[in-house]
Image (cartoon, rainbow, N blue to C red):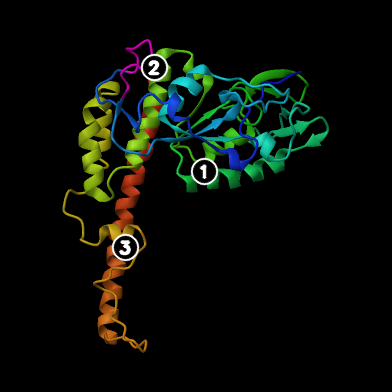
Amino acid sequence: MQPDHGGHASRPSDRVDQPSAASDPVDGAFVPSDRVDPSAASDPLDGAFAPSGRVDRPRVAISSCLLGVPVRYDGGHRRSAFLAEELGPRVEWVRLCPEVEIGLGTPRDPIELYETVDPARPRLLQGERDLSERMRGYALGRIAELRRQGIDGYILKARSPSCGLRDVNLVRRGGAVERAGTGIFARALREFWPELPAFDEDDLEDPGVARARVDWIFTMFRFHRREPGSAGLHAFHRANAESLASLAPELPAQLAALLPPTSAPAPDEERWRNGRRDPDRDSATSANGRTSENANANTDASVTRRGDDSVFERERDREAEYGRVLSAALSRLPG
């Protein structure tokens, strides 16, 4: 049996694949327009983007065989012209290959998923070699690294025993093979980062679905790059409410219920969010290292700081819930 395997960058140093200036017809980042119906255009990118003047672009992880890198088990690739040529100039790719990064060569013997008594923990075998725990351990560490990198989406190789989100060949305990599995890396991604826009190349075959998936990435990119604090979240909501309503009429009201109060934030809000001290509250230290503030002032500042922290923590929780609800709704489009 020759399962369909994903392919990704062969080593971490190759993760970022920026298109050359010659291949990028428009310099600058792209963001979705506000009034485009993803199901309306035959070209998923037709009219979907407008130059923003910003230098940053969505950072998107991808199975690099989809960009033409020959890392599949058979030494081949599954290059997607749409991803490489159309979407590529509009994003910053982060390429990776779980199978190669856990030490498997190219070409290599195929790996397969085997059913166990626990549906959430199938075995990943390469012949008699059990790679299950190696892949799970790798997945947890790599996903944590991708979080630190701040990726905005992930495009995975369909039906791969490591990266397939659905319909992966699964060897049942009785020996029958069914397309009923989820790749081990993909399962960990869904479990530990459920709000991340993640889909496979099969979703790009239908123009309406492709458009919705691209809009999902770019909308969440704008959400994460908004101005900090409650004012920034309110501004994001106002700017996107009309376009979101065109996709899902009930969504703006659902998200509005999660907005924090519109009262002005504390002057040092951004400082606390970034974990920096407020210089207005810092003690003035003399050249010989002695503080000029008395103990009572330090105590008062500490109490105030704890109170501010609790307020900001509640706001962060609301912002995070807003993002989860927004991403979940976009993941279901077009519905």
Helix, strand, or loop for circle 2? loop
- Kind of residue indicated by mark 3: Asp
Q: Is residue 127 visible?
A: yes
Q: Residue at label 2?
A: 44
Q: Nearer the viewer, residue 177 or 150?
A: 150
* Dot placed on the residue nearer the N-terminal end, 3 or 2: 2
Corner quadrant of residue 33: top left
Q: Nearer the viewer, residue 175 or 44?
A: 44
Q: Residue at label 1?
A: 146
* Dot placed on the residue nearer the N-terminal end, 3 or 1: 1
Helix, strand, or loop for circle 1? helix
Quarter of the C terminus within the rendering: top left
Q: Which residues are magenta?
A: 38-49
State whether the magenta stretch is mostly helix, strand or loop: loop
x and y percent of residue 138 in the render? 64, 44
> Horizontal placement of 181 versus 49: left or right?
right
Total of numbered circles in the picture? 3
Q: CA distance from mark 3 to mark 1?
A: 27 Å
Residue drawn where x is 60% and y is 42% of the image: 12
> Horizontal placement of 310 versus 94: left or right?
left
Q: What's the mark number on residue 309?
A: 3
- Kind of residue indicated by mark 1: Leu
